[in-house]
Image (cartoon, grey):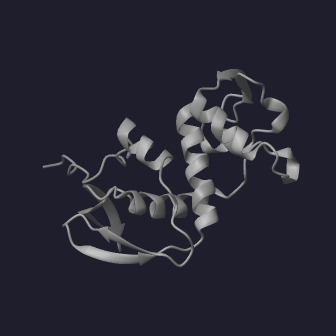
């Protein structure tokens, strides 16, 4: 009676990796291109997937883990230049706040930087550069390869109809 109906979804829930999942991703050996991998869906059904773009998957894994280990947003990691890297710190001017911040490097973030330190990049980036859209696509594939298949509820709207359905965490 004059009170609006409660919306089905107030906001998107944040999906994140816990410490063990991050460690699993960081240590994931990326299968070779064309290799077929046996995986399981959220219902325990086995299926097979052929690995494609193994090199890009390895880079996306490294970039995501670097962001997690340094608490950087994708945009700030994307803009990180070699001149911003020292032995123990990276210096980041955040895109959102325009503040220049020193960030301690831990052994994991240091190892990722060292892996790419001799790489030639356009614009002297400290890490490989891929688009955010491609990164998200590769992260779904990596999550699938890691077995992050626990069901989560994901809302969606199609033709103005809102619904919720369980999907694997990596979606």
Which corner quadrant of the image does residue 158 belong to? bottom left
Q: Relative to 67, does residue 60 appear above or below in the rendering?
A: below
Q: Position of residue 168 (x, y in %)?
A: 30, 61
Determine the residue positioned at 62% across, 44% down: 74
Residue drawn at the location 74% of the way across and 29% of the way down: 93
- Percent coordinates x, y for residue 88 in the rendering: 71, 21
Q: Is residue 13 visible?
A: yes
Q: Locate residue 18: give its quadrant.
A: top left
Q: Quadrant of the C terminus?
A: bottom left
Q: Is residue 166 left or right of residue 142?
A: left
Spot occupied by residue 96 in the image (x, y as percentages of width and height): 66, 34
Residue at image location 77% in from the left, 30% down from the top? 85
Most extreme residue toward the left, as rendered?
A: 1
Residue shown at 63%/64% (left/top)? 55
Q: Residue 9 versus residue 44: which sits nearer the camera?
A: 44
Q: Is residue 18 visible?
A: no
Q: Which of 155 and 161 is in front in this view?
A: 155
């Amino acid at each position: 009676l004059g009170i609006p109906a409660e919306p089905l979804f107030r906001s998107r829930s944040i999906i994140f990796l816990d410490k063990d999942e991050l460690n699993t991703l960081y240590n994931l050996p990326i299968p070779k291109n064309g290799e077929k991998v046996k995986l399981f869906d959220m219902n325990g059904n086995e299926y097979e997937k052929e690995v494609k773009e193994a090199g890009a998957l390895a880079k996306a894994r490294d970039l995501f883990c670097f962001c997690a280990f340094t608490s950087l947003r994708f945009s700030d990691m994307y803009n990180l230049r070699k001149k911003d890297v020292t032995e123990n710190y990276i210096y980041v001017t955040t895109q959102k706040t325009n503040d220049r911040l020193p960030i301690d490097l831990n052994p994991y973030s240091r190892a990722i930087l060292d892996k790419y330190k001799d790489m030639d990049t356009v614009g002297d980036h400290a890490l490989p550069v891929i688009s955010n859209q491609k990164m998200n696509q590769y992260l779904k594939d990596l999550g699938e390869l890691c077995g992050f298949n626990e069901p989560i509820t994901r809302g969606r709207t199609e033709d103005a109809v809102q619904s919720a359905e369980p999907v694997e965490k990596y979606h």
